[in-house]
Structures are given as structure tokens and as C-alpha cells.
Image (cartoon, rainbow, N blue to C red):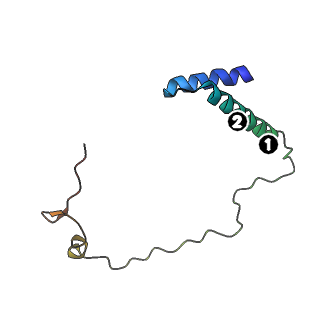
Amino acid sequence: MSEDLKVWLERISRLSLIRISSEEEGTILNDMKKIIEFFNTINSLDLSNVEPLFMVLKDEPVVRNDEVGEGLSVDEVLKNVKEVEGGFIKGPRTA
């Protein structure tokens, strides 16, 4: 598995154009081994008697009803804008 991880790390490094020193490589490989061990531990758990959990909280999500209200007038909106041109909001140029 260690060689597979090393090949994986070299490939990711090459594809992302990121140079990884040998010291960093050792640290990253060690971290990856720990992460894989952790997930292997999770995968080995016997969950046959555990019902699937769809939502952590049993309460219904709190939502509010949409209520139509009076909005701002065009003049009120435009007086809060930095630049207006021809009755429209003028934004910065994009490349």
C-alpha cells in the first residue's frame, strides 16, 4: 500500500504542478496512511442493527412562510448605489 500511495502522491504532485520535498512527502504519506486506517476502521464497523439516519435532529426544520411585502421604489434603490447610468445601476467592468 505504501508504494501505491507514493505513486498516487507523485501523480497528484505532477498533475497539480506542485513540488513536494522528500520531507513533505514523508509527512503527507504518513498522514494519508492514518486517514486510510481511520476509514478502514469505520468500514469494519458492524452496522447491521443500526437504522439509517436521515436527519440528525428529530425536529422539523424551522422555515418561515414567504410573505409578499412592499419593496423599495426604484428611486430608493438608486439613491444607495455608487454609480447610476440611464436609470440603471452601473457596475465595474469585467475583463
Q: Is residue 37 or residue 85 the one in the foreground?
A: 37
Q: What residue type is labelled 1?
A: Ile
In the rendered image of this protein, does residue 79 appear above or below residue 36?
A: below
Q: Mark 1 points at which residue?
A: 42
How far across and down, in percent of the image, does residue 21 sit?
59, 26
Structural distance between the alpha carbons of marks 2 and 1: 17 Å
State the SS at label 1. helix
Return the mark for residue 28: none
* Circles 2, 1 touching at the beta carbon (< 8 Å): no
- Residue located at (71% from left, 61% from top): 56
Q: Mark 2 points at which residue?
A: 31
Q: Which amino acid does label 2 sit on?
A: Asp
State which quadrant residue 38 falls in.
top right
In the rendered image of this protein, does residue 67 appear above or below residue 8?
A: below
State which quadrant residue 10 falls in.
top right
Q: Sort mark 1 into few (<14), some (14-19) or many (20+) by Cα contacts within 10 Å.
A: few
Q: Which of marks 2 and 1 is in front?
A: 2
Split into 4 quadrants, where in the image is the C terminus? top left
How far across and down, in percent of the image, does residue 60 sit?
65, 69
In the rendered image of this protein, does residue 5 appear above or below residue 56?
A: above
- Residue located at (72% from left, 38% from top): 35
Given the current orientation, which residue lies at the most extreme front position?
23
Q: Which of marks 2 and 1 is nearer the N terminus?
A: 2
- Residue located at (76% from left, 52% from top): 52
Q: Is residue 5 or residue 61 the one in the foreground?
A: 5
How far across and down, in percent of the image, does residue 54 sit?
70, 56
Q: Sort mark 2 into few (<14), some (14-19) or many (20+) by Cα contacts within 10 Å.
A: few
State the SS at label 2. helix
In the image, taking residue 87 as reference, residue 61 lies left or right, namely right
